[in-house]
Image (cartoon, rainbow, N blue to C red):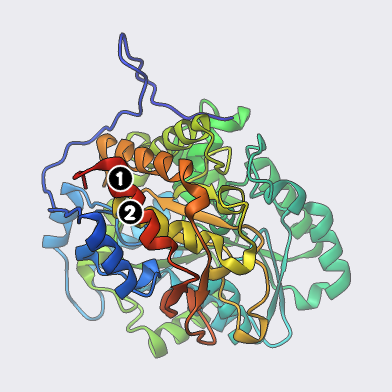
Amino acid sequence: MHIIMSKVKFYKEKEVPLEFHRVKIVQKLTLLPVEERLHALREAGFNSYRMQQKDVYLDMLTDSGTNAMSDRQLGAMMWADDAYAGSTSFLTLEKAVQDIIGKKYVVPAHQGRAAEHTVMTALVKEGDVIPMNYHFGTTITQIGLAGGRFVELINKETAFKSDSENPFKGNADINLLESAIAEYGVSRIPYIRMEASTNLIGGQPFSVANLREVRRTADKYGIRIMLDATLLAENAYLVTRREEEFRNKSLKETVRTICDLADLVYFSARKFGFAKGGVIATDSLEEKYKMDQVTATYEGFINYGGMSTKEIEAIATGLYEAMDEEYTCQSPDFISYFVKEASEYGVPMVTPAGVLGAQIDAAKFCDHLTFRDLPAAAVCAALYIAGGIRTMDGGTGGEAFPDSESDRKADMELVRIAFPRRVFTLSQTIFCLDRLKWLFDHRHMIGALAFDDLPMLQRSFRSPLKPVGDWPEKLAEQFRKDFGESR
């Protein structure tokens, strides 16, 4: 297992990840008694997305827009230029993107999803096919709305094996890429999409060596590459730890190497830049003009793209901070520590540890349940009962399949325990580990969940669930028996 730990060694204490920041502003949290947790879960329809923040102790649902901003970012927001056109804040963002991403033209959007909509609306047409290392829910929806379709290039034999030593499960299979080009033809493939740290298979990175192979293949056929750089800083961080060529390279050098291999780069600043917004970067003026038209129609003027100029300033500062290894290392180091400790206890985790969050293999965790029992959603509900911890269903219940395919199985049944950047302390991490270990020891008490309602799309965000039987009540009773009056 590839373990990432701080460069700082301890003398007598157990080696743990070390933060390189201090807390200056705090937000109060509440840990409800287990009976109140059960009530809150029932009110939310056993769906973590429907829960109220006031009922959550550790919000580990996502790192999207939940990261802590730095003192420099908050300060930068105070001098933002609110001009509708010609804002100096846009020039600040443009310079930061040019310095770090290395592309000349910048198109802002109000978040990553909007950036993706702009890209796909402007550059994908009816009948197009987009090969990609792996899908993300909003990505394939946007491609479909533009009239296109997608083809996955991931090696399923290695990528879908949760307990693995493969350091780069996010790599594209070049043979599958060649087959896709042969099947659909160059004229139907305007772009190859590479996602930095594939979200839905456990935040797994691709290697620079693999991206170079994709680049060579793309150049052979005259096809462009688009890079979803939303988790690029962490992907680059893992490259510096796992790819020999980059062991002595800086994070900024590694990021630029990756971006130079792509023609178009877009990202959600909620993850890359630590503020709420989205950015597209390209060296093609023709592409920029096409995307500007979409931005002006759906987002706002091309200098702000639906964002507050305060957010624009925060993103520009955050991009530079993301190149600071001592900032960026905290999230993947905490995830690596969590995965190591949980795995040693026997909890089936996705290994090697990826980025964004620690991932439980719910199919193995609840091997007494079938995929139709929604095991990932059930583990999410059970972990909230165990400790007031909100996590994300990355399994069958979390896929955005239409109801006509409601019996379709997800590629993996994962529970994501997200680690927003610079948010949680080590003691909170250890608390989460402790409650997970308790739940693992009582995993056979976890029962099935079923959909109470099934909207057509993005059902994971909206659909209430219902337990099959009274297993949540029994689990809460067991908690009270084992922990006494403790919360």
Report the side of 148 relative to 273 (left or right): right
* Residue at 28% in and 44% down: 422
Label of residue 477 in the image = 2
When the figure is inspected, residue 147 is found, relative to residue 113, above or below; the finding is below
In the rendered view, does 482 fall on the left or right side of 173?
left
Residue toward you, 26 or 247 = 26
Q: Amino acid at mark 2?
A: Glu
- The vertical placement of 164 against 295, above or below, is above
Local crowd size for mark 1, using a 10 Å CA cut-off: few (<14), some (14–19), many (≥20): few
Tell me the CA gap for discs 2 and 1: 6 Å
Rendering coords of residue 91 (x, y %) = 29, 64
Residue 218 seen in the current view? yes
- Write down the residue under mark 1: 481
Number of numbered labels in the structure image: 2
Name the spot of residue 444 as percent of width and height, x first.
53, 50
Q: Evaluate whether residue 97 shows in this view.
A: no
Marks 2,1: beta carbons within 8 A: yes
Residue name at image x 64 percent, y 40 percent: 163
Check disc 2 and report its element: helix, strand or loop.
Answer: helix
Amino acid, disc 1: Lys
In this view, 343 is above or below 307: above
Name which residue lies at 45% across and 75% down.
Answer: 465
Q: Residues within 10 Å of mark 2 (few under 14, many from 20)?
A: some
